[in-house]
Image (cartoon, rainbow, N blue to C red):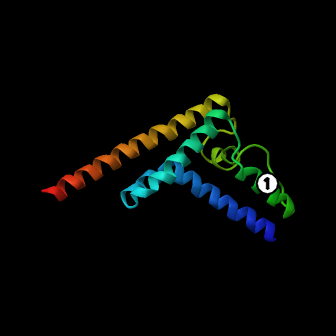
Amino acid sequence: MLFSLAADLLLIIHLVFIGFVVLGGFMLLKWRWLIFVHLPAVLWGVALEFQGWICPLTPLEQTLRRMGEQQSYSGGFIQHYILPVIYPPALDDDFQFILGVLVILINVIIYLWVILRIDRKIKQAGK
């Protein structure tokens, strides 16, 4: 039971990390120093998608599930948990590339928006 709980906790951490990679740029409005954590996370997420790698958290979760006598799964976290909810079950290299590009585009838009907001705030404070 302990291993199953650990696997479930790791699953939640994994999902939060993915959310942070995609939308964490908004947190820069409050904590600007977070850019030093967020940008490497984005680069890691994009590299995983572009290279077709599997996040190291995935095999760890699978191992914990097996140790907890639960059925494990093959493939990566996104293929197993996220894509079946949003997309058809087939994930190929082209689709992973598109996901990587989407992560980049979303973050470029967020960063531009954050920069414009901070710039406007600085200009208003200077008046």
Left or right side of 91 for 19: left
Camera-nearest residue between 112 and 106: 112
Amino acid marked by disc 1 = Gln
The 10 Å Cα crowd at callout 1, few under 14, some 14 to 19, many 20 or more, is: many
Residue at 78%, 65% in the rendered image: 4
Which residue position holds label 1?
Answer: 62
Left or right side of 118 for 96: right
Q: Secondary structure at mark 1?
A: helix
Q: Position of residue 44 (x, y in %)?
A: 59, 44
Left or right side of 22 for 77: right
Residue at 69%, 43% in the rendered image: 79
Camera-nearest residue between 82 and 67: 67
- The quarter of the image holding the C terminus is bottom left
Q: Position of residue 119 (x, y in %)?
A: 26, 49
| Above or below, 102 relative to 57 | above
Q: Position of residue 9 (x, y in %)?
A: 68, 65
- The quarter of the image holding the N terminus is bottom right
